[in-house]
Amino acid sequence: MIQRNFTISILIILLSSCSLLPERKVEIISKPLEIEIMQPDLPRPVELTAPKWFVVSEATITNPCKKVVQEDGTEKRPKACAKEDTENPDWPEGYTYLDRFLDEMKDQNNGEVLFVATSVGDYKVMAEDMQELKRYIKQLGEVVLYYREVTTKTEAKVNETNKD
């Protein structure tokens, strides 16, 4: 029994003690790790469409006479002609740009007319805002290109050092 207790004690001391085992040297190696950086897609370009603006006045529209081919082959408009010889014989006498605009809007909108207007000052503000938007988008594109260039150069340098 004493021998058994002695064996267990020695076994416990040997198993729990590290000083009896020879030291192992730990080697620390530092080397660069390749980090794969996902390249972002460039933003889709903004496609702006210019708004359609109407200038409507009560000035009478000129309804010119149809061109007449002369004997030498050139075309000329007579200064005066009958109503049926004008380019738009269906226009009434004194037909204005306002009348034509209202007729076109009624045709396009099932007989209803709606005006949306802006002042010159508001139009100027809208134009300046549009330029600001263009500037912002251009600068954002430059930031993305810079980021792409920097990360691409970093990856190229890492690949070059790994070859050596």
Image (cartoon, grey):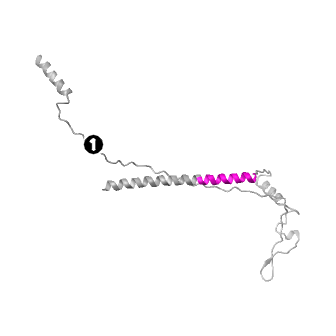
Is the residue 97 above or below the residue 12 in the image?
below
Of 114 and 68, which appears nearest the observer? 114
Res. 105 image quadrant: bottom right
Looking at the rendered structure, the secondary structure element under dot 1 is loop
Residue 40 point in image, percent of width and height: 48, 50
Quadrant of residue 5 in the image?
Answer: top left
Q: Report the magenta residues as a range.
A: 118-135
Question: Could you tell me which residue is drawn at 13 percent across and 22 percent down?
Answer: 7
Foreground: 78 or 47?
47
Q: Which residue is mark 1?
A: 28
Q: Residue at x 55, y 53 (%)?
A: 139
Q: Is residue 68 left or right of residue 51?
A: right
Q: Nearer the viewer, residue 107 or 158?
A: 158
The foreground one among 75 and 153 is 153
Q: For the residue marked with disc 1, what is the amino acid? A: Ile
Q: Main secondary structure of the magenta part?
A: helix
| In-image side of 112 versus 24 (left or right) | right
Q: Residue furthest bottom?
A: 72
